[in-house]
Amino acid sequence: MKKVLVIGCGGVAGVAIQKCAQNSEVFSEICIASRTVSKCDALKQKLEGKTKSVITTAQVDADNVDQLVALINDVKPDIVLNLALPYQDLTIMEACLKTKVDYVDTANYECEDTNDPEWRAVYEKRCKEKGFTAYFDYSWQWAYREKFEQAGITALLGTGFDPGVTSVFTAYAQKHYFDEIHTIDILDCNGGDHGYPFATNFNPEINLREVSANGSYWENGHWVETKPMEIHRTYNFDGVGEKDMYLLHHEEIESLAQNIPHVKRIRFFMTFGQSYLTHMKCLENVGMLGTEPVEFEGHQIVPIQFLRRLLPDPASLGPRTVGKTNIGCIFTGIKDGKERTLYIYNVCDHQECYREVESQAISYTTGVPAMIGTMMVLQGLWKRPGVFTVEEFDPDPYMEALNKWGLPWQVDENPVLVP
Ligand code: NDP
């Protein structure tokens, strides 16, 4: 009988909380907290009478460590699941450390104000030393390793789909199919159509910051950086068909490069339609993706936050999105002295997700693994003092749980490779 405190009540949290509520044998109590408690109350109301889990709600500003500590002391959870934004990762980890409670998230730390001089100095040093310029990286959270070890608590980082399931697929391939994995191509395909000329499938600010940035990949022990959308391929995805995809920087490349011993190259590709790319380029060209405040008629406005207000709420896309996602990893390497290739992937249908939890597949494919990762720590299967990414644990119970909780996966031992 365990109690989870979920911070955030947006698209991903909505799914994760419903999945925890379906799994009330593990999650006997769920406390939902964000700044807007009315949203948490609405979700609680939706679930009432449909679950044995006891659900409570609370108000918290997760940018404020003292507020978080007070909430954790009041709720006394066994674990905190952070489904707010990557901006809140460090404050929530700090509060978990102070209260000695386990921590789980789905995205690595990103600084909200990229002009903060203190952050900027560390960032610029890291760009020079490591060779990639993304605003997010694991160093901030890995810096907590020793503190979490000493406190005897676990932090499980990045248990969404990507990062998350894709890294568990890698650990599974390593355990059962390869002596040495040499290349990993992570392919994230969304074949869904929501009927809008332009909308993002999860938080627009985080999404647009990610896809308008330089791309990069890991090769022979170092990062190779590309211009945004410079590397383009097409791939024929099972369940979706042929799609254009583009190489992006993605956070799991950083941890997989450290944790998969013989890997020579890791790339990440995401599919985008032409309409999405044209809109994004145009918005970028006119300055609407800017993260610095501008003064407008006496008000300070951050362009990308204003844009977020104008775009459809990702949570509203559920009823209108049709089609499927296909996300997985293609591996090449060696087994018993022979070359081998492997593709592990999941196909998820937007409308089936909507029927089950009233959400589109992007939130679904992130929310389900968030619940599963939290369950792995709560059940003691993935509990170890320190700060870890998902590929550092035994993948088998997680892979089993994916099949059970709505994200069944398939293995293709003869896939078409990406050139
Ligand atoms: P949403 O914008 O829909 O939801 C964010 C939630 O965070 C809201 O409920 C908001 O509530 C809450 N929040 C924001 N700031 C604070 C704060 N200061 N204090 C308390 N709560 C706060 O985002 P998504 O659900 O789309 O994404 C959630 C997370 O999942 C993000 O970190 C995203 O990067 C990650 N993600 C990971 C993926 C993966 O595969 N690994 C894929 C997609 C997303 P309120 O405003 O009421 O405070």
Image (cartoon, helix red, strand yellow):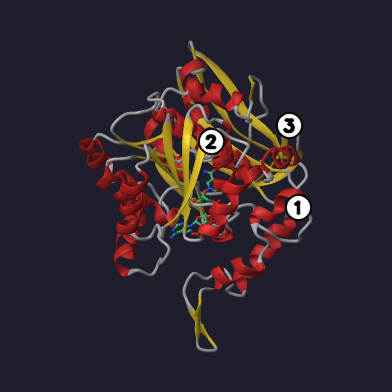
Q: Quadrant of residue 347 in the image? A: top right
Looking at mark 1, is its residue's CB closer than 8 Å to ligand 1?
A: no
Q: Callout 1: helix, strand or loop?
A: loop
Task: Specify the amino acid type for callout 2.
Answer: Cys
On screen, residue 130 versus residue 328, left or right, reads left
Residue 139 is at least partly visible in this image: no
Residue with the mark numbered 1 = 194
Instruction: Identify the residue at image location x=33%, y=50%.
Output: 140
Task: Specify the amino acid type for callout 3.
Answer: Asp
Dot 1 or dot 2, earlier in sequence: 2
Q: How far apart are marks 1 and 3 (CA)?
A: 20 Å
Q: Quadrant of residue 91 in the image? A: bottom left
Q: Where is residue 219 in the image (x, y as percent from the top left)?
A: 45, 39
Task: Specify the amino acid type for callout 1.
Answer: His
Q: Where is residue 216 in the image (x, y as percent from the top left)?
A: 49, 49
Dot 1 or dot 3, earlier in sequence: 1
Which disc is residue 20 wearing?
Answer: 2
